[in-house]
Each structure stands twice: as C-alpha cells, then as structure tokens.
Image (cartoon, rainbow, N blue to C red):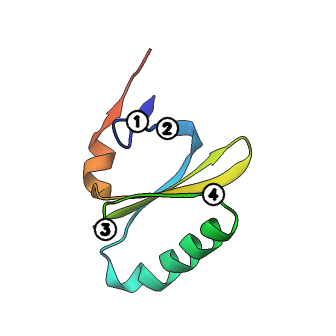
Amino acid sequence: MYINISKDIIIKLDDIIGIFDMEENNKKDALNSIIERLIENKAFKDISDGNPKSLVLYKKEGKERGILSNISSYSLGKKKKIIN
C-alpha cells in the first residue's frame, strides 16, 4: 500500500516512520528540531505552501527523510491507497 502525499509524491506505507501533526503546540519544538536535522542532512522537502499541517517522516534507501505538507495528518491517514 502507498500514501499519496501530493500529486507528485507517493510513498510506500512500509517506508513511513510517522505522520505528525504540526498544529499540536506541545510537539512543535521537537518537530522543529527534527526538521532542522533533516535540512542539515539535505533530506527535507517543504510542500506546505507556507501552511504546514503535517510532517511525514519516512526512509528511502536507508536514509531518513521528511516532507512538510499542508495536508493534515488526519487527511493523509485517510488517503491510503493500493496502487498497482
């Protein structure tokens, strides 16, 4: 199974580490720290258009990566699809 993050980004569910809600105030510092580390490692993509709602952490080729999205974690969870 896969999850469609945007029209151009599809990630295998097995590769996803977690989908985190950026709007939860009690987690913002921890998530911002993760984002900073991903940016330093050149493993980060921001597709949020200035409206970050979720952070998708996943592994690709053994490397941790992250995508900041303007789609809520709840909506992303509902977007799981089987793609052949």
Cα distance in 3D space between marks 3 and 4: 19 Å
Labels 1 and 4: the sequence-earlier one:
1
Task: Tell whether label 4 touches label 3 (CB within 8 Å).
Answer: no
Q: Secondary structure at mark 3?
A: loop
Horizontal arrangement in the rendering, residue 56 relative to residue 35 (left or right): left
Residue 7 versus residue 25: which sits nearer the camera? 7
Horizontal arrangement in the rendering, residue 38 relative to residue 67 (left or right): right
Residue at the spot 66% in from the left edge and 55% down from the top edge: 64
Cα distance in 3D space between marks 1 and 3: 18 Å
Residue highlighted by disc 2: 11
**Looking at the rendered structure, which numbered label has been put on residue 50?**
3
Residue at the spot 32% in from the left edge and 47% down from the top edge: 77
Residue highlighted by disc 4: 43
Residue at the spot 74% in from the left edge and 46% down from the top edge: 62
Mark 4 vs mark 2: give the one in front. 4
Mark 2 vs mark 1: give the one in front. 1
Residue highlighted by disc 1: 8
Specify few, some or many for label 2: CA neighbours under 10 Å numbering under 14, 14-19, or 20 or more: some
Cα distance in 3D space between marks 4 and 2: 15 Å
Labels 4 and 2: the sequence-earlier one:
2
Task: Tell whether label 2 touches label 4 (CB within 8 Å).
Answer: no
The amino acid at mark 1 is: Asp
The amino acid at mark 4 is: Ala
User: x, y percentage for residue 23?
Assistant: 30, 74
Labels 3 and 2: the sequence-earlier one:
2
